[in-house]
Image: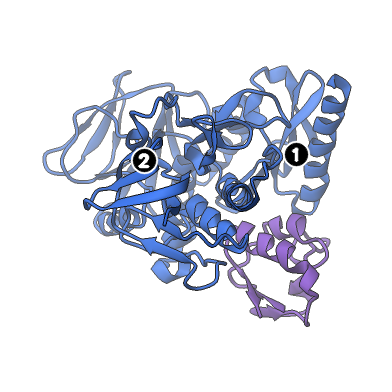
Amino acid sequence: MKVIVDLNKCNDHGQCVYSAPEVFSLNGRGELSFRDEARDIYVSDQLDESLRDALEEAADICPMQAIEIEG
Amino acid sequence: MAGVVVVGASLGGLRAADALARSGYSGGITLVGDEPHQPYNRPPLSKEALLEAQDFDAIRLRSSAKPGTVSLVTGVRAASVDLGRGLLFLSDGRELAFEGLVAATGLRPRALGIPKPSAGVVVLRTYEDLVRLRSELATVKDVAIIGAGFIGCELAASLTQLGYRVSVIAPENVPMLRPLGEELGAALMRHHLRAGVAFGLERLPVAIEGCERPERVVCNDGSSFEAQLVIEAVGSAANTEWLEGNGLDLSDGILCDERLSFGGDGRFLAVGDVARFPNLAFDAVPRRVEHWGIAVDTGRYAGKALGRLLSSGEVSPAFTPMPAFWSDQFELRIQSFGIPGLVTDASEIRVLEGDLDGEVVVGYHRDGTLVGVVLVGFAQSHMKYRAAVAESLEAAAGASS
């Protein structure tokens, strides 16, 4: 399972951080920390299946609907 | 076979159907919506979709249910329901039997009962409303927005950024008074004023004058505002008519218990802004909550709770979410946690950090408990203040039990 974030859609609301703090965090500027490592589209490494519920919640609660779960 | 029917195919209904499907419920799930579209996201209608001329694909909501587990019926309204017999009657004459029901029919915008021309006066709730608004905007320069709530203020910001001359007309003395309080509302108003928005506050519109299209909005104090387009953003009414005749309290949305169920039966739940429920993390007063996030949270809770009840007879714990909402106006991100609107005593609303004319954090206190915070900017502090509200509520609950 991977998580994909469209960083052009993402508006740094940070709601994902409450749902899946193991995966999402904000940097010191209050931006999604994936912005420090990717432009346009962030694709995670393979993630543990135990995170699925939390990631689904994060995808549901994203105001910009920028998070997708693959696999 | 009687499965579950979710009535209302917007955010709350979709999330309820998704969560029910993911719970493994196998009795059949039907999602019924009166709009001709697949479920879509409404907040961008007053912001990104308007500013960036996004098309429907950009605002479509994805479903997390396995394909084939939820049947979507669009363009059909729920006409009535018989809860006792478990039958839903649709506007196209069909009947759907159910063992569980989720009411997610949301709100519709109110319109003012004042004289107005037949064209050039619009509301904004649906994608069709946005398409109409865009086509109306093509021929106008001056826009009057009636109503100074979040939608009115977001539209004022978006349209000013697009180059229109915008006036906001409302009875309150500052915009966003009820949810944010007077001081913060006044600070945000100064921001709008600097950006060029005109305000006509503490007055009521009495007529929209013009022959075929608006020319001006006339108010009860004799003032008038030039406008070739008028947007009414004066609040909403709950879509509950279809539930009448079942002995329910529908006086302001659907009265629910702390598990979102209504009619005294855990198999009937309401979600989204049509549900009036007590959030026991705050108190026992049932309230409707018109936040995007509550549509998601109630939907997820209801789908899961219903799946659990129908599969194993198990009753879920009470629904006690942390409410949160946001609003984007010009370059400002306004983020709220908790229920700031609970506090009306100005002395209980205090700046916690920053200052009102820049980035600021405002705290809303009730009986010594921090029941809400609103942050303008301070993006890096969202987590800290959300946690502060949660901790304060927990401490209050611990002290009273």
The answer, for residue B357, to whether it is visible in the render is no
Left or right, B127 with respect to B42, comes to left
Q: Earlier in the sequence, mark 1 or mark 2?
A: 2
Classify the position of the C terminus of chain B by image quarter.
top right
Classify the position of the N terminus of chain B by image quarter.
bottom left
The residue that disc 2 covers is B108
Q: Which chain identifier belongs to the blue chain?
A: B
Whole-percent x and y of residue B343?
67, 23
Is the same chain shared between marks 1 and 2?
A: yes
The residue that disc 1 covers is B361
Closer to the camera in the image, B54 or B322: B322
Whole-percent x and y of residue B253?
45, 31
Whole-percent x and y of residue A50?
79, 69
Q: Residues within 10 Å of mark 2 (few under 14, many from 20)?
A: some
At 49% from the left and 57% from the top, the residue drawn is B14
Whole-percent x and y of residue B83?
40, 37
In terms of secondary structure, where does tag 2 sit?
A: strand
